[in-house]
Image (spheres, helix red, strand yellow):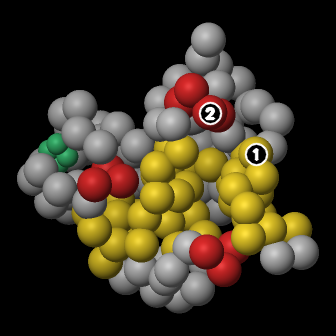
Amino acid sequence: MSSTEALPPIDLGPAGQYPEGQVFRVSAEDSGWNDDIAVVHAEDGGFYALDDTCSHEAVSLSDGYVEEDTLECPMHASAFCLRTGVPETLPALRPVKTHQVTLEGDRLVLHPGTPRPDTESGE
Ligand code: FES
């Protein structure tokens, strides 16, 4: 079962277990979302989440690289803005969806299907 609608939040455990500058994958099976989700602990200390499948080809962005405020695809190096999901470099042209991540106490909570409030993709 998979959804394109907002789903119940998922407790990802203590935020402290996710090192800065790293990306982690939450499986579609675990979230119920229609794609895996790449969760990033960025170098600015913030947490971000994007659809895991690159909008250029079917490549997992969670195998890519956190570069400042972007997640870079491991295949052709399109860099997706962590806040908006919009690719800032070619060859990808379409944004990937964003998902809200919140801190509740010391716990990291993912909200699959709920876009970040400052997202531009909004779809
Ligand atoms: S597969 Fe991601 S940029 Fe080409």
User: Residue 89 at x, y = what percent?
Assistant: 20, 61
Residue at the spot 52% in from the left edge and 58% down from the top edge = 39
Sooner in the amino-acid sequence: mark 2 or mark 1:
1
Q: Is residue 35 left or right of residue 30?
A: left
**Mark number displayed over residue 10:** 1
User: Residue 109 at x, y = what percent?
Assistant: 76, 57
Residue at the spot 35% in from the left edge and 38% down from the top edge = 53
Q: Which residue is mark 2?
A: 30
Q: Nearer the viewer, residue 19 or 80?
A: 19
Q: Is residue 55 left or right of residue 101?
A: left
Tell me: is circle 1 under 8 Å from ligand 1: no
Q: Quadrant of residue 22?
A: bottom left
Q: Is residue 75 left or right of residue 41?
A: left
Residue at the spot 70% in from the left edge and 56% down from the top edge = 12
Instruction: Provide the secondary structure element on which disc 1 rests.
Output: strand
Question: Which quadrant is home to the C terminus?
Answer: top right
Q: Which quadrant does ligand 1 occupy?
A: top left
User: Residue 72 at x, y = what percent?
Assistant: 26, 63
- Whole-number angstrom distance, CA of label 2 to CA of label 1: 9 Å
Q: Is residue 103 above or below residue 34?
A: below
Q: Nearer the viewer, residue 82 or 29?
A: 29
Residue at the spot 77% in from the left edge and 52% down from the top edge = 11
Q: Residue furthest right?
A: 105
Question: Which quadrant is home to the N terminus?
Answer: top right
| Res 116 visible | yes
Disc 2: CA contacts within 10 A as few (<14), some (14-19) or many (>=20): few
Q: Is residue 45 above or below residue 110?
A: below
